[in-house]
Amino acid sequence: MILLRASGIHRRKRIKPGMPEKTATDRIVVVSRDAHCFASARHTHQQAQLIYAISGVVSVTTADGTWVVPPSRAVWVPAGIEHETKSHAAVQFRALLIDPAEVKGIPGVCAVVEVTPLLRELILRLAALAERPRGAEFERAVTRLLLLELSFLPVEPLNLPFPRHAKLARFCQWIQNDPARAVALEEAAGALHMSRSSFMRLFRREVGVSFAHWRQQARLLHALSLLAEGQSILNVALACGYDSPSAFSAMFRRSLGRSPSEYFASPAAIKGG
């Protein structure tokens, strides 16, 4: 068995009113939810999880940081990693619970996965098979093809790492909550009662990148959430601390290789099931 059998879960069984619908084929557990917005409590799974939004933007947060992905990407969460998931505006959410022992070369930490057009269609087909089975042979073929298409090659960074240092973590949370705020390096160092050089060393040691890079990444991920809500580029630029849409678009293109409108261009949303 490549994927876990859903023990004790029957087809089309709703767990609780207002909770995601869990359905199962003989080889996979599929969690489906279409909602205006949702947020889960922090939790873990015995299986690895591939978290994907057919439409909308999903964020996954662990103790190490936050991953924000649009429909062209998914988040891989290893088994046993405590995490919480939430959507930004309306979302069509699908998650696959996968036995990590049967998938070779998987990362031991959360990672962003590129969702190719084929992988997207395979996710949708598996969600549909959970409700309308077409036989074990067909399900095995779809499952095997999905695992072959699932790639863990490096993609553009869509995560925001967080420090373990308590005071620095609180400072980073303050910046994340107000990404438009302009904070000079000297002000950041003063907030932690440190010299400029001490703050720079601490930040890079704890987070792995410079403060300037981290702040830009916080703005970029906030922008993805706002763009997913349908806000204009002007509003998003101002909300993220940029003086003009052109300055914001230039940053976006440098970071992700495409303009904001190009990045969110994707096939029409298709409801699973």
Image (spheres, rainbow, N blue to C red):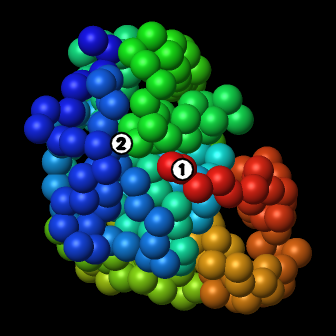
Frontmost residue, 6 versus 159? 6
Residue located at (30% from left, 24% from top): 26
Discs 1, 2 touching: Cβ within 8 Å: yes
Mark 2 neighbour class, 10 Å CA radius: few under 14, some 14 to 19, many 20 or more? many
Instruction: Report the residue that reaches farthest toward the left.
Output: 8
Instruction: For residue 260, say whether it is visible.
Output: yes
Q: Residue tagged by mark 2?
A: 30
Tell whether 60 sits left or right of 179.
left
Please, is residue 106 above or below residue 261 in the view? above
Number of numbered discs on residues? 2
Residue located at (52% from left, 61% from top): 92
Residue 272's label in the rendered image is: 1
Helix or strand or loop: what does disc 1 sit on? loop
Residue located at (55% from left, 35% from top): 125
Tell whether 34 sits left or right of 237.
left
| Amino acid type at image mark 2 | Val
Q: Residue 159, percent across and down?
A: 47, 52
Tell me which corner region of the image, top left, top right, bottom left or bottom right, holds residue 84. Answer: bottom left
Tell whether 197 sits left or right of 119.
left
Q: Residue 85, percent across and down?
A: 34, 61
Q: Residue 20, percent across and down?
A: 31, 61
Mark 1 neighbour class, 10 Å CA radius: few under 14, some 14 to 19, many 20 or more? many
Instruction: Report the residue that reaches farthest toward the right.
Output: 246
Real-space Cα separation, disc 1 to disc 2, in angstroms: 11 Å
Residue located at (25% from left, 59% from top): 14
Helix or strand or loop: what does disc 2 sit on? strand
- Return the disc, 1 or 2, that comes first in the chain's sequence: 2
Tell me which corner region of the image, top left, top right, bottom left or bottom right, holds residue 103. Answer: top left
State the quadrant of the N terminus. top left
Please, is residue 37 above or below residue 121 in the view? below
Q: Residue 104, percent across and down?
A: 37, 11
